[in-house]
Every structure is written in structure tokens, then in C-alpha cells.
Amino acid sequence: MNPEKLGMRLEGNHQYFLNSTEQASSSEKEKSIQNQETPSEVEEKIIETTPFTIDKKNTLELEAKKRHLEVQQALPRNETSSERPTKKTKADTTQSSALAETEDILSKSLNPEPYYEAMKKCFGQATANKSIPKIKQLIAQQKVKTERDLANVIFNMVANKFALNKPVTGEEITKMHAALFEEPLKEFSEHFSSLKQIPEKPHAAYLVKSLSDCFQALSAYKTCEDASQAARDYLDKKPEPASYHRGLPGFLRDCPPSEIPEQLKKIKQMNEEIGNLFEQAYEKYQKEIIDYQEGLKQFPLLSTHALGSTNVNETYILQAKGEKLFIFKPCIQDNFSQDPTMGSREQAASGINLNGMFPIPKTVQISFNNWQGSAQLFLQEARNISEIEQMQATVSPREMHALAIFDLISGNGDRHSGNILYKAIENSSPTQYKAYGIDHDRCFKGIGEPLKMEYLSHPAFKAPFDQNLIRLVDKTAREGYAKYMQSREMPEEALEWMNEACQILEKAIKENKNSLGIIKQLMEKWNQKLERQDEGFDHY
């Protein structure tokens, strides 16, 4: 991939920019809240292109930065904009290499016609016809000058389509994939989709590619139920330790993996013949369980219930090419509908994350083969609370505070320990883990059940809230949340609660009050509202 064409350094990675909330500037976050577009607006708007990382000491680079900032001001903002300044990962970046990139961007001529055709293929003639005149005007004003500028416009329009309060269909994914992964967008899309993604803000090209891969894998089956049944049939063939040796289940249960070689050695020392037979049984089981686990990768729709999940709602892993890509929670399965609004609430938990500071993985609504629901980005290499406790790992207090703020303002009735996963924070030393909230179908429903926050024993809540998190609850944030919630036609009481909770949290953060005390105060207020509501029902 040509780095000059991309307008970025190869050693940089825009996807790392928000890997830790400390790395994002407050001004950018505030703007992203203030200028959030409603779902009814985003599809037809031309979205900003964002400046790449440049060295301020160089005159040409200052020129490039100024031009890109003009584009930023001229084009509408979008919370899913993924073209963020790159975080340097190597210290040996030279000014000469940066200068070469900038000179190439400034001098490269632009032929917009192929991009207009890509827009028509991606969004349809009607949307393209509304967008192209605006782009032409920006080109005439020298505010969109490069291929990268135009590519970013299209990427952000795709991101906005995923933000709409309606499912993206398999047919739409096919069209978007054809547009993004053919010229003139092919190189851009292949590059950005291959980068390591930020769970909160994956690149639009990655979303399109990964969903396209999943849908293609599902196309081998007549229905989604057929795909699910094929996986269940395979799961029935899982190797059972007892069938290899009657003592193997207890051995595997009681012996930590790291101690198995030593324990096998001790068994052979006690009785060589029995020890050898037991070791052979163990090795045969290990080989076949590995083969079995590898075989699971062939199934595009894998029920988490079949894998031992205790979730109330049926949930699936969407996977393709041997990689887990999304957690899919259907709200409509063929002719059965358990809760048509569930997918919208799941998506809203991600969509209300206007500045990327809430640790909520990207969630979209999808529809394919008569199944419809939410698809949340799968957290690669994530750990559960048991693993974190066993490792005695450190969890970032700031992320715990951010998660608590989200749960409070969204009225979350289901944040038990199983609905939190943990990922190592890039480049943290010593390694810290970031808590991610998953499973949000019981958010934004109004005052209907008690709040559940089963993680308040974490040491983070012995201290005041992180001061930088005030941006999550200040007036600008409240206005952004309100605009988003109103666009989703959420219950009025959910909107009122959000405003009340934010104001109390803002005051508490300013006064540096203990976080646990404020959380308990808000939970008590919620319970009082719930009791009054129950009394009203009793009256009737």
C-alpha cells in the first residue's frame, strides 16, 4: 500500500488513536458531541475528512494541516469518523519522510469521477445525486483536493449508514463491499480493514468486509436455522475426557494446565505402566479436542448457549474464515419475534457513545435470511472476570468509572459480572486492562426495573471520579445524548433520567466527591422513582 496515497505514515496506525481514552484530546471529543447528526440526517450528508499526523515545524505540512482543518469545518461532523490523527509507534520518524508524504498529497491531481461512480454503487443513485453537487462545490473551493479526501467522505457516509436506526441488509452489504473493495477505493479499503481495530470505533471498511465475509459464509446454508443446526450437530460430537480414561475428568478439573507435565511425571514414577497408559489417554484427548476446536471455526453461526453461555436471550457468534467477528443477538428469527426493539437498544448503547469514551464495542443492526438483530464487534483476546481475578490483573480505574457513568445514565438493569469483558491496554506498562460493557438490551427502557451494577466493589470506586470524565456528563454531552435519544423516540422518562443523572454526576465530579457515594445516591433515586411507579400501578 502506498503510504503517500493514504496520507499517513506506515508506522502510524489511526486505529490506535483511541486505544486508551487518555490519548484523545478534549476539544475533539467535545466537538464530536456537539455536532452529532441524527440518524435521519446522516445518510445524505457529506462527512468530514480529518487531518493526518504532521510535523508542525515544516511549512508544507502546516499548509496541509490548514487545508484539512478547512475541510473539517466545512463538512458535517460524525461520531463514527475513523480518520483520526495517528499515534506514533516508533520514535525514528523523520521529517524528510513526513515532507515527502505531504508534498505528494499536495501535488497529486484528483479525478473525482470514479469516486462518484463508487458512491452510486454504494448508496444508490438518489443518495449519490444529493451528495455529488456538495462534493463538487467543496472541490471548487479547494477544500477537497485529494483522493484521500474523497475516500474519507465515502467511508464516513458508510459509517453513518451503519448508525441509522434500521438494519443494514445483506444486499446492502454486498453493494457496499463491491464499491469499497474495487477501484478506486480498493487500496484504501484493504489497508484500513487490515489494521487492528478499536472496538468502539472500527473503520467502516472493516465493518463492511467482516459482515460481507459472515454473510458469504452463511450463504452456504439455505436458512440461518440450518446453519445453527449444523453447528449444534457438530457440538454433540465434542470429545469427553471420561471416554479416554475414567480418571481424566478429575485430573483436568483439579490440575492447572501449567502443572500437568509435572503431574504426569509423578504418576509414572508411582507406577510406570499405569502412568504411561494415562499419559497416552491424555495426549490422545488433547489432540482430538484441539482438532474439534479447530473444526468449530467452519460454522458461521455458533450458538453461545451451546458453548455454555447462561444468557437469557439466544446469542450467536458470527464467524468467517476461522475468525470470530461479531456477537449476534437476533430479535427476529424467521416468523418469531421476541422483542423487535431489542436490536435498536443494543445499537443505541454504541451509538450514544458520541465521543468514544464509553467502553462499549461498536454495535450495528443487521438483517439476513429472515433473521434480524444486533451485531456487536467481537472482543478479540478478551478475558472474563474470573481470569482477571486469577491473574490479579490491574483494571484501569478510569474505564470502570466511564462504564459506571454509562450504566447510570442509560438505566442499565443488567450489568452483572458476565456482562463485562477485559482487554489489555496497548503499550501500558505494567499491563492494565480496560473493562468493556457488553449486552445492552435492558438499557434506555425507562424506569421499569432496578439498576444492576455488580462491579462496585472494584477499588476504583473508593476514589472520586476521574476529572476528565466530566465531558461525559456536562451540558454539551447532555444535549448530544438528548438529541440522539429523541431521534430514537426513546421513552420520555429515560430522557428525563439521563438529564437528572448527568447533572448530579457533573456536580459530584466538579466537587471531587467519592464515586461510590454518588452512584449509591443515584441508585436510591432510581429506586424511589420505581417505587412510586409501582404504587401507581397498585392504585389501579
Image: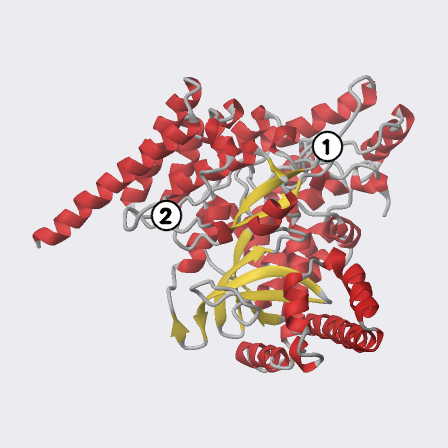
Residue that numbered label 1 is attached to: 429
Mark 1–mark 2 distance (CA, rounded to whole Å): 37 Å
In percent of the image, x 87 and y 27: which residue is there?
Answer: 99
Q: Position of residue 54 (x, y in %)?
A: 78, 26
In percent of the image, x 82 and y 42: which residue is there?
Answer: 5
Q: Is residue 515 above or below residue 375?
A: above
Q: Position of residue 507 (x, y in %)?
A: 38, 22
The quarter holding residue 308 reads bottom right
Residue that numbered label 2 is attached to: 444
Image side of residue 257 versus residue 500, left or right: right
The residue lying toward the viewer, choosing from 84 and 501, is 501
Q: Secondary structure at mark 1?
A: loop
Q: Earlier in the sequence, mark 1 or mark 2?
A: 1
In percent of the image, x 90 and y 30: which residue is there?
Answer: 97
Please name the amino acid that badge 1 sits on: Ser
Please name the amino acid that badge 2 sits on: Phe
Total numbered labels placed on residues in the image: 2
